[in-house]
Image: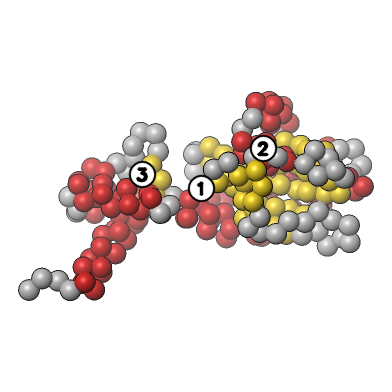
Amino acid sequence: MPPTDTNGSNRTLERAAAILDAVGRSSASASELSRRTGLSVSTAHRLALQLAEYGFLRRVDNGAFRLGDRFVRSALENVGMSVLTDLRDQTGETAQLWVRRGDERVCLLSVDSQQELRATIPPGARLPLPQGSSGRLLAADEEALAELAATGYVESVGIRTPGLGSISAPVQTGEGIIAAVCLAMPLAHVTHSPGKDHGDKVIQAAKRIAQAIGP
């Protein structure tokens, strides 16, 4: 008797879960996924490609598969909130976490300053690249990368929004820059420059998130 639609769906879900469990340990080629899951190479490869289409997996340069943006985003959100809250409390300014999505950057998290005069932007907001310090960093423009190499952060002073400044530092893993921690503030609060005032704290916050996520 042929399987019902429900049984067929369950079988597909079981196979997809097996693929995700296998990739969760480390990146894997289709043949390695086949070995880890017991599926045929063709089935493992087909399912991995489908999971990549929906962001559950990501294909890297050598053709292997890794966990995708959906999982990275969840991990960033889980780790990031406490780190951003600490950064906000240390500096008194708004702390944000940004990721790149195509030609835009998306605000995953924002912990607003508790001061009456503050910079603020809601989670989910999208801004075009390369606007702002996070935009320049995530777009990897040449000047931003040079600034990053020299100081460990990228700074913006009244460029995107007059009267506001920001510093951004990269959340960097073995996959490269996966996000940017940004501290945004009214320039009226700045003593020397955004970077000189708070750059070291932003760098440390970004490193804390990267270390918590893993290699």
The Cα atoms of the two marked residues, 3 and 2, are separated by 29 Å
Point out which mark residue 65 bears.
3
Query: Who's the residue at 73% across and 41% down the image?
Result: 132
Closer to the N terminus: mark 3 or mark 2? 3
Between the residue at mark 3 and the residue at mark 1, the CA separation in whole angstroms equals 17 Å
Q: Could you tell me which secondary element the residue under label 3 belongs to? A: strand
Task: Check disc 1 and report the residue beneath it.
Answer: 214
Q: Locate residue 199, reporting x and y percent.
A: 77, 40
| Residue 25 in view here | no
Which residue lies under the disc numbered 2?
Answer: 130
Q: CA distance from mark 2 to mark 1?
A: 27 Å
Name the amino acid, label 3: Phe
Q: Nearer the viewer, residue 195 or 144?
A: 144
Do tag 3 and tag 1 residues touch (Cβ < 8 Å)? no
Based on the displayed image, in which of its 4 quarters is residue 130 positioned?
Answer: top right
- The residue lying furthest to the left in this view is 1
In the figure, is residue 96 to the left or right of 79?
right
Element marked by disc 1: loop
Q: Are marks 3 and 2 in contact (CB under 8 Å)?
A: no
Tell whether 199 sits left or right of 175.
right
| Dots 2, 1 in contact, CB < 8 A | no
The spot of residue 145 in percent (x, y) is 65, 29
Earlier in the chain: of badge 3 and badge 1, it is: 3
Residue 58, numbered circle: none
Residue 122 is at least partly visible in this image: yes
